[in-house]
Amino acid sequence: MHKESMHVLHVVGARPNFMKAAPVMRALDERQQVRQSLVHTGQHYDANMSDIFFTQLDIPAPDVNLEVGSGSHARQTAEIMSRLEPVLIERKPDIVLVYGDVNSTVAAALVCSKLLIQVGHVEAGLRSFDSSMPEEINRIVTDRLANLLFTPSEDGDENLQREGVAPEKIYRVGNVMIDSLIRLLPAAMQCVKNGLPERYALVTLHRPSNVDDRATLNSILDSLLKVSERLDVIFPVHPRTRQRIAEFGADGARIHLLDPLPYIEFLALQRRATVVITDSGGIQEETTYLGVPCLTLRSNTERPVTVTAGTNTLIGPDNGKLHSELAKILEGKAKSGTIPPLWDGHAGERIAEILCQLPVQRDC
Ligand code: UD1
């Protein structure tokens, strides 16, 4: 007997979710018996943190925007939960897909679990083992609740199995964010920014542990000033960091501070960078794919494969290490890396295939 189509509802909220959801939505779109809807929580709401990503990644406009905006962790998470619940009750999806490790991810997973709606977590199993990171709490709770766990790399499977997740719930599909990178790299190659220096360090910073504490941020900014004596520093500033830099009055003249950049423009800058200095998670992966040296201003990473296989080096709190690693890169002695397995542009398709083969699901 013909059953109605499977309804997959995606929940996204913050900038790094968008490039992960895009390839999954695209792959499901090609399957005729799947109906999709998209909920944007509104965690990120500035045009250059959200709208421009929808345009460049060719994501359809959200069916619902919960418009939660900013707030403390508890308030933001609670707002997402209470605004999402009636949407899910009304729309009755067969499965909800959540992405990454932001507050929108964990909030949606919690609501679905209580409503007995299946949850698929895309980018499951990553662990920094640092519970002072809000994202680590989000990862652990989301993975504990999810019914389907789509991992990007082997370490993800190992972490989940160690935590007692049944192996049949774990699907190693590869890295969906790299799907978006591969698709839009040609556009990034065409994107020429006038007046770009020959060699430059591309910097991003937004982790609370780096930017919320005055002494830590000032020490990082001092270090960046020192870096800028050796090469130009291009620094697209996350709103959170911009606020802090303004508050601390630590703006440095030789550092080029920009507004947050669209996806393609940022990818273009990454590809041509001499070195990327960051505390982001996703950028550690993108630089590994691009073969660009990455110095990560953190003591740990939930993406260890970028260090063991890729071009990433953890700097930790020691600014001396930043300068010694930078010196190696400038002398042409950067570590070389390889691209991890399944970071091949087809992770979204693998997820679509798995969803369509679920035993209880419809004929797609
Ligand atoms: C969030 C994610 C983080 C991710 C980052 C990517 C959580 C816990 N953190 O951090 O994992 O790496 O997104 O960007 O979910 N703001 C704006 N405009 C916006 C959004 C935020 O001005 O569109 C400002 C607000 O002052 C806000 C602050 O940035 O208070 C922080 O935003 P928030 O969503 O709480 O976390 P992020 O630091 O962006």
Image: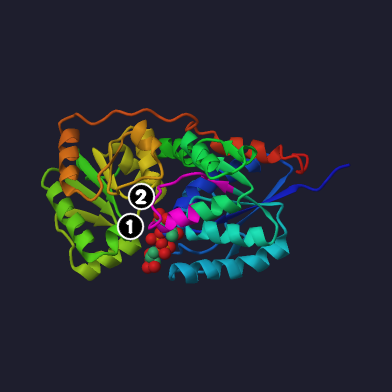
| Label placed on residue 112 | none
* Direction from residue 120 to residue 43 in the image, left or right: left
Q: Position of residue 275 (x, y in %)?
A: 25, 40
Residue kind at label 1, given as amino acid type: His
Residue located at (49% from left, 31% from top): 344
Q: Secondary structure at mark 1?
A: loop
Q: Position of residue 335 (x, y in %)?
A: 26, 30
Q: Secondary structure at mark 2?
A: loop
User: Is residue 228 among the parts visible in the rendering?
Assistant: no
Q: Residue 284 falls in which quadrant of the image?
A: top left
Ligand 1 is within 8 Å of the C-beta of the residue at disc 1: yes
Residue located at (77% from left, 43% from top): 362
Q: Position of residue 26 (x, y in %)?
A: 59, 42
| Quadrant in which ligand 1 is drawn | bottom left
User: Is residue 44 among the parts visible in the rendering?
Assistant: yes
* Direction from residue 77 to residue 36 in the image, left or right: right
- Relative vertical location of residue 136 with respect to residue 33 in this rendering, above or below: below
Label 2 crowd (10 A; few <14 / some 14-19 / many >=20): some
Question: Could you tell me how many numbered marks the image carries?
Answer: 2
Residue located at (35% from left, 46% from top): 266
Ligand 1 is within 8 Å of the C-beta of the residue at disc 2: yes
Residue located at (20% from left, 63% from top): 215
| Label placed on residue 280 | 2
Specify the segment rendered in magenta: 121-139
The one nearer the camera, 358 or 69, is 358
Residue for badge 1:
206
- Relative vertical location of residue 129 with respect to residue 325 in this rendering, above or below: below
